[in-house]
């Protein structure tokens, strides 16, 4: 290969790289614009009357109709659905974080027979479709007589969140310096104290990251909640939104339906915006440690 051929190949390589980055940025910007326009349209529609909505789909509302939110919050039991989702989500995130961090610590720091098999089993759980476990899960809960209850839903959600939690946190615990663990043991700390006071605080970025992802997953989960709950007073927000769509759709009150959708979007959006840097920081730390 001559020097000119090398220069030409290098130039084409740089050009291809720039084109690839340009295409990536274009797709990301386009996706962001579509997402922003969708949220803006839902927000505008939540303040409209039915006449305004059908007269001009993309037009601004002439009057701000806060009554749409009042109807969605009170008449459609959205307040009850919201409380159920908060209760289920917080308990699920807390239990999954505690169990997942303990399991990850054992799998990462202790060598025993079946260690890799057990870790592979956790990781394989991420590949199991949720629809595949619905019938066995319902039959098991039915035999235990715990169907149609929020604790049963929390137990199911914890099982769904554990594979991802263990997968992420195991990488964090594996890369923590063993010298800190040995120093704590020499100072008289027990294994429990080493985990709780030394290792777990060091894995805080990873724990926060998986907790945020688990929160968003459980807050928006629909299939399990629909399958395991039949009592309207125990339903979560996604199932409640479907009921709101049915009731307000039959009543012709589309503004209240969009208002209910905005109410559901607000908590997840706030959590993401407030903790966005922690998400990126946790993922970056995990990548660097890996």
Image (cartoon, rainbow, N blue to C red):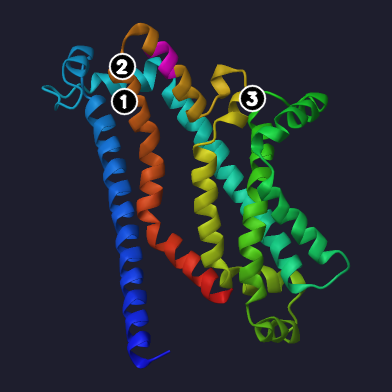
Q: Horizontal and vertical percent for residue 200?
A: 62, 68
Look at the picture and state if 190 lies above or below 94. Answer: below
Q: Residue at x 62, y 18 (%)?
A: 230
State the SS at label 2.
Answer: helix
Label 1: how many Cα within 10 Å (few below 14, some 14–19, many 20+)? many
Look at the picture and state if 264 lies above or below 271. Answer: above
In the image, taking residue 64 as reference, residue 290 lies left or right, namely right
Look at the picture and state if 237 lies above or below 182. Answer: above
Look at the picture and state if 42 lies above or below 29. Answer: above
Q: How many marks?
A: 3
Q: Can you tell which quarter of the image residue 229 is in? A: top right
Q: Horizontal and vertical percent for residue 82?
A: 46, 31
Q: Pick whichever of labels 3 and 1 is earlier in the sequence.
A: 3
Q: Quick one: quadrant of the N terminus?
A: bottom left
In the image, taking residue 123 as reference, residue 72 lies left or right, namely left
Q: Pick whichever of labels 2 and 3 is earlier in the sequence.
A: 3
Foreground residue, 127 or 176?
127
Q: Horizontal and vertical percent for residue 81?
A: 48, 26
Q: Which residues are magenta?
A: 244-248
Q: Residue at x 82, y 61 (%)?
A: 117
From the image, tell me which residue sits under label 2.
254
Label 2: how many Cα within 10 Å (few below 14, some 14–19, many 20+)? many
Q: Horizontal and vertical percent for residue 168?
A: 61, 62
State the mark number for residue 227: 3
Q: Residue at x 72, y 34 (%)?
A: 133
- Mark 3 to mark 1 CA distance (whole Å): 25 Å
State the mark number for residue 259: 1
Q: Nearer the viewer, mark 3 or mark 1?
A: 3
């Amino acid at each position: 290969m001559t020097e000119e051929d090398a220069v030409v190949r290098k130039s084409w390589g740089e050009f291809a790289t720039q084109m690839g980055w340009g295409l990536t940025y274009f797709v990301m910007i386009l996706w962001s614009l579509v997402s922003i326009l969708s949220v803006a349209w839902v927000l505008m529609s939540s303040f409209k009357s039915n006449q305004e909505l059908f007269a001009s789909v993309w037009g601004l509302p002439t009057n701000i109709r806060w009554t749409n939110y009042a109807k969605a919050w009170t008449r459609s039991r959205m307040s009850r659905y919201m409380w159920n989702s908060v209760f289920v989500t917080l308990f699920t995130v807390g239990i999954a974080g505690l169990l997942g961090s303990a399991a990850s610590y054992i799998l990462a720091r202790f060598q025993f027979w079946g260690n890799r098999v057990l870790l592979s089993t956790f990781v394989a759980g991420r590949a199991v479709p949720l629809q595949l476990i619905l019938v066995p899960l319902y039959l098991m809960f039915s035999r235990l007589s715990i169907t149609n209850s929020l604790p049963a839903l929390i137990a199911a959600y914890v099982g769904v969140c554990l594979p991802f939690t263990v997968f992420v946190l195991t990488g964090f615990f594996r890369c923590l310096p063993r010298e800190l663990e040995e120093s704590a043991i020499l100072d008289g700390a027990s294994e429990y104290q080493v985990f709780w006071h030394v290792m777990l605080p060091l894995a805080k970025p990873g724990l926060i990251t998986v907790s945020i992802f688990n929160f968003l997953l459980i807050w928006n989960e629909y299939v399990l909640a629909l399958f395991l709950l039949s009592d309207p007073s125990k339903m979560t927000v996604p199932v409640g939104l479907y009921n709101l769509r049915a009731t307000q759709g039959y009543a012709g009150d589309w503004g209240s339906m969009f208002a209910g959708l905005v109410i559901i979007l607000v908590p997840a959006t706030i959590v993401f915006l407030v903790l966005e840097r922690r998400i990126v920081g946790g993922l970056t730390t995990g990548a660097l440690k890996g």
